[in-house]
Amino acid sequence: MSYERNNIRDMQGYSWGEQPRQSRVIKLNTNENPYPPAPEVAQALTDVNVAELRRYPPPFADDFREVAADLHGVSQNNIMATNGGDELLRLIITTFADAGDTIAMAEPSYSLYPVLAAVQNCKMQRIPLNDDWGLPQDFADQLNASGARIAFIVNPHAPTGRLLSAPELAQIAETFQGVLVIDEAYVDFISPDISYNAVPLVKQLDNVILLRTMSKGYSLAGLRFAYGIASESLLAPMLFKTRDSYNTDLISQRLATAALKSQAYARECWQRVRDERSRLASALSDLGFDVLPSHSNFLLVTWAARQVGGELLDANALYQALKAQGILVRYFAQPRLQDKLRITVGTQEENNTLLQAIRGLAGQ
Amino acid sequence: MSYERNNIRDMQGYSWGEQPRQSRVIKLNTNENPYPPAPEVAQALTDVNVAELRRYPPPFADDFREVAADLHGVSQNNIMATNGGDELLRLIITTFADAGDTIAMAEPSYSLYPVLAAVQNCKMQRIPLNDDWGLPQDFADQLNASGARIAFIVNPHAPTGRLLSAPELAQIAETFQGVLVIDEAYVDFISPDISYNAVPLVKQLDNVILLRTMSKGYSLAGLRFAYGIASESLLAPMLFKTRDSYNTDLISQRLATAALKSQAYARECWQRVRDERSRLASALSDLGFDVLPSHSNFLLVTWAARQVGGELLDANALYQALKAQGILVRYFAQPRLQDKLRITVGTQEENNTLLQAIRGLAGQ
C-alpha cells in the first residue's frame, strides 16, 4: 500500500544533472567551478580534529554568519546558513506558502522550483520571459494578479546568463506583495566593472531574500553550503522555526568560512572564468553558434541544425555526440531551448577539447 | 509586515539543548558519546582532497548505503542517508502527512516531533505512557482511533531508557494503519545479550521505518548524518521526490561510511558506555536517587526534594547548582519529569566529577 500524500504520489521528482563518477569525463553540464577551492579551505580541513565531531555543531553557524555579514556590510541577523541552496529554496516555500497557494517563477528557470512547489502542494505560475529573455515590463503586476506568495528570479539568469540591474529588481520588489527570491547562485561571475549589488535591497525592503551559494563561486558544490541574505524579520521564522535544528555540520561550517574569507583567491578564479568565457564565446561563435552574452559561468548557445555526413546534426544530436566522446554539456528538451546547449565554462584545456570535438563533429 | 504562514507565525520553535562553546564544561545534557570517533574516521578525513569538493556529491550517498545495507542484511534500496536524524523526521512528516492531518507520539518523547508537526500544520495526538513508562496495551488502537497518519516511538525510549521488544513493535505496526517511525537513535547502547533487532520488521511490514543516527553511537553529532531503514516503497517518495537533491555532502558521506565500517571500534565504545552506565547508576542510587534501568547512554533519575543548609534542593535547583559548577545535565520542566534529571553517561572521569559535585551539593 502507498502511504505518501496524494500530491507527492502524483508529482515528478527532480532530474539530477548527470554526475558521472569517472573523473576523466569533461564535465561542462552542471556549472561547477573549474578551479579548486582556496588553499585556506585545505588548511581548514587539515585543522579539523575529528574528536570535535563528537559534539553537536554550532546550531546557527555563527562564525560563518559573522564573516558573511562583514563581507556584505549587513548584520549577522541578515544572514542564514543552509545545507546548500536547495535547503534555502525549500525553506522559503515551506515557511511562506501554504498548500494550495500560488508560487511564481519566470520561465524558463531552475527546474527545481516547480519540484519544491509540488512537494508543498502549491500551484506554480510560470511567467514567460520575453524573446530577449528579459522579464516582461508588467512582471510584478502579473505576480500580484496571480496572487503569488513567493516569486523566484535567477540573477544572473540561468540558463541564459542575462543580468537584471539592482534598480530593476527593486522596482519589482516594491510592487510585488509577496516574498521575492533573487537566486544569485552565479553572482560571483558578473564582471566587477558592472558594479552589480543587490544587497542594499534587503536593508530597504522586508520582502526580498538573496540566495548565495558556495557551490559555484567558491568551488564547493560537494560541501553543500549556501546562505540567505534578507531582513531580520524575513529570516527569523526560518532560523528559529522551520529549518532543521542543526542544518549545517561542523566541517562544512569551517570550510565555508575559510572559503568566504579567501576573497583574493576567489576573485582571481572568477576573473579567470570570465577570461575563458570571452575566449570560449568567440570560438563558439566562429564555429557557427549564436552565443548569448553571459554574466555567469556558462554560455547558452544556439545551434542551427544541419546535415553532416548525411545525418541531421541538431542540438540534441550534438549533445549526444559530445557525450559519446566523454564531454558533458547540458541539453534541455523543452520549448524555446531545444535548439540550444548550455555549456559550463571549463579550464582552458577543457574548453579547447570541447572546441576540438565540435569541430570534428561539425566537419569543420 | 509578516509573510510567514499563519501556523508558522503562531508556533514555537525547537529549544536547543545547551551547547556551550567552552570545552571545559562537563557536558552530560545532550547524550553525546564521550569517546572520539574511530581512527578510520580521522583517516577518511585526511584522505579527502579538497579539489574533489568542486563537484556535486553523489546524490544518494551510495557508498554509505552499500555499507549500511551489508551491516543490516537488507538491500541498498532499504537505506536512505540524511543530513542528521532531524532531516529524516521532517521528511517523514512532509511526505506522509498533509496539513490538518494527525500525527501521534507517546508522551513524553523527543520535543522535536511536535515542532516538526507544527511546521507542517498537523495536529499532534499525544498518548501518555503508563506509570512504568511502557506503552498502553491499546496503543495501536488509540493511534487508529485518532486517525494518525504517522506515529513516533523512540526505542530505547528517551528520556527514560526503557526498551520495547521487536515483537511488541511488530504487533503495533501490524495493527496501526499509518506509518510507524521507530526512532532508534540510542539503539547502539542496548546490551548485545538482549539480541534486540527491529530490522527484520521492515522486510515484513511496508509501514515501518527505523531511524538510525551516526550522532550518538558513532560519536559524530557534529557531522549530521543519519539514515532510515524501511521498505523500498516507503523510502522511494523521500529518496526521489521530497528530500533536497543533494542532501548529504561529500565529506560527511566519506566519514560516516568509515565510521559505519569500523564496527569493532564502535562496539568497544558502546561496551565502555554500558560499563560506565552500570557504575554511574549504582553510585547515583547510593546518593539517594531513584534510578530507572536504562538501555541507552543516559539515565533518568528521580531526586526527592530535600532541605540542604536551609534551602530547598529540588531537581531543578540541583540542575542549576551543577550548571553553576560547569556540569550540564538535562532538566525538563514538564509534567511527570519535573522531579527528575536526565544524565548522559560520560567518561569515568566526567562521571566521577559529577558524583563528587552532587555529594558536595547534597551535603553528603
Image: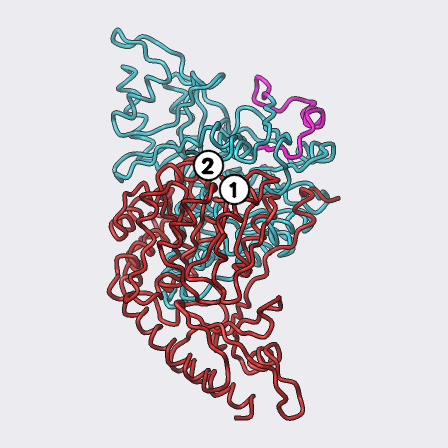
Chain colours: A red, B cyan
Residue occupied by mark 1? A149
Of residue A261 and residue A345, the one placed in the foreground of this image is A345
Q: Is residue B351 magenta?
A: no
The residue at 59%/68% (across/down) is A336
Residue A334 % position (x, y): 62, 66
Q: Chain of mark 1?
A: A
Residue B135 lies in the magenta stretch: yes
Q: Considering depth in this image, is B145 or B75 the residue closer to the camera?
A: B145
Task: Name the element at disc 1.
Answer: loop
In the image, is residue A352 above or below residue B100?
A: below
Classify residue A184 as left or right of residue B134.
left
The image position of residue A115, as x and y in percent, is: 58, 52
Residue type pointed to by label 2: Tyr
Q: Looking at the rendering, which quadrant does residue A231 occupy?
A: top left
| Mark carried by residue B3 | 2
Foreground residue among A346 and B169: A346
Type of amino acid at the residue the image marks with label 1: Arg
Residue B337 picture location, percent across and down: 46, 19
Residue A145: quadrant of the picture? top right
User: Which quadrant is the C terminus of chain B positioned in?
Assistant: top left
Locate the N terminus of chain B by quadrant: top left
| Residue at 36 percent of width and 65 percent of height | B50
- The magenta segment is B128-153
Secondary structure under the numbered disc 2 in the rendered image: loop
